[in-house]
Amino acid sequence: MVVTGGRAGSPLVLVSVAALLALYALFLSLNVEAVAGGADSSGYLNHARVLAGWHVRVATRRISALPADRVPDYLYAPLGFRPVDDRPEQVVPIYPPGFPLLVILARLLVGWGYAAKAVLVLHAVAGVVLAYLLGRGFGLQKGWAAAGAVVLAASPLYLLISLQPLSDLPALVWTSAAVFCGLNAPKKDGWAIASGLAFGISVLIRPNCIITILGLAVLMGTSWRRWLSFALGGLPSAAFFLLYSYAVYGNPLATGYGNAAGMFRAEAVPGTLVYFAHWLPLVFTPAICVFPLLVLPGMAPARSAWGLAVCVGTYLAFYAAYVVQGRWTWPDLRFLLPISPALIVGSLLVWQAIGARAGRGMAGLRRRAPLAGAWAAGLALLLAGAVQFQQDKKLHVLALVRGEPTYELACRWINQNLPPNCALACMQFSGAAYYYTSMVVLRYDELNPSNYRAVFAAADAEGRPVYAVLFNWEEKEALSQRMPCGWLKVREIRDATIWRRTGGAGRLED
């Protein structure tokens, strides 16, 4: 790290770095919204609660007067769950168990109220530290490695995902740890064990992190003892994954995502690659555009260069064919987040090599080449911070997460003001409603004019009032197209609305 007036590694430098990391952690703590919100965040937190109760399958909250043969498949399944094939009265989480397990561990120390926030903040700080360590491990000078850490820490994508309970940030941390340990594995078998352990945890968090094994294969070489050590490190996670998948899905190799083949299409590749080329330089600075040059001779040692290239290339190839709902938006780049430190480090290795060659080639500067490199790294650090700060403001990162508390606020009002035996018709709110309330949750997207009357008639037979909890953009589809009966708006909470069913067909009342 380039610090004026202090030697790198001196107490002053270490204290300064620790202070900066503490300030970063404080900033995150003040802005993180660790609430059960949409499908992903509520799915992970609901999953944590299910596992904490020593369950893998949970009984649905249902209308007992509604015959089983009249129940649409996902009527009682909140977002983040799916019905059990052989037992439709039960649902199982669809998301992997790794992140929920981390939340459960944190709960033992700080309680449920702060568990998700603690996991996010600790992993966000760890991700920045690992980015620096990766840079040093792959041969970056201290200043360049510090610049890489700043690029990651200030990235709008990294900040956005650090402020919500999603698995992408922990996946980045444990993937980075696996790569860092794999890089050092040729030195000592203990590093191979640590790499296997971190790799196994990353796969528990995000099963598609398994493709990192290709980059690790380049970094670790072909020693059978090294790979045996790696396998021993990953064995606990592998055993848990197989047992968990069998208990939940009936197949040790299955995941909650089901058959994902339809999510990948070859015709999507050209458009997705163009999208990557446009947005990745914006969220990680244009400096990463030189990454493809890494494999040229002289940019970095061959093992390092090709290891980084394979890590990044496999992820880009994997997700190039991935079809997101609707179209790609810049927050969807979170799928690539686990290899973002490798992308940044590889790019800075190129810039470091270019700077070193330029310094050696200039008359009178040969003896000053190291000093010139330090100044170049310091300038890169300042520019990276400035560019990322401007991009954070332009993309309104903090504003994107400030809408998340709406879920919790609406559910709190529901608990305080609605009958405890009511049924809540919702879709986007379904995971949050399941997490924050004990009420029956009905997925309105499973209803239509031909079946909603039977569902509501069964609710009436039980004396169970029906309310709808919707965001503004859901109102037309839910109230006019899928459940076209009488509805009375009873509350607005930010951009969410709560409606009470008033009876038969009729116009909406405000």
Image: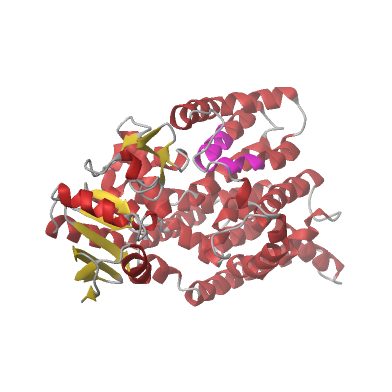
- Residue 178 vs 233, above or below: the answer is below
Compared across the picture, whether 65 is left or right of 121 comes to: left
Kindly indicate the quadrant of the structure image that contains residue 363: bottom right
Q: Is residue 57 visible?
A: yes
Q: How is the image coloured?
A: secondary structure
Segment tinted magenta in the rendering: 197-211
Residue 10 position in % (x across, y down): 53, 52
Q: Residue furthest front?
A: 450
Q: Look at the image and tell me in which quarter the N terminus lies.
A: bottom right
Residue at (86% x, 68% y) in the render: 361
Residue 224 position in % (x across, y down): 74, 23
**Tally of numbered tags:** 0
Residue at (73% x, 67% y) in the render: 372
Q: Look at the image and tell me in which quarter the C terminus lies.
A: bottom left
Q: Is residue 498 magenta?
A: no
- Residue 79 vs 373, above or below: the answer is above
- Residue 352 vs 437, above or below: the answer is below
Compared across the picture, whether 400 is left or right of 1 comes to: left
Q: Nearer the viewer, residue 316 or 437?
A: 437
Residue 293 position in % (x across, y down): 80, 60
- Residue 51 vs 471, above or below: the answer is above
Compared across the picture, whether 231 is left or right of 369 comes to: left
Compared across the picture, whether 119 is left or right of 351 comes to: left
- The kind of secondary structure the magenta stretch mainly shows is helix
Q: Is residue 371 visible?
A: no
Residue at (21% x, 46% y) in the render: 438
Q: Nearer the viewer, residue 471 or 317?
A: 471
Q: Is residue 210 magenta?
A: yes
Residue 339 position in % (x across, y down): 62, 51
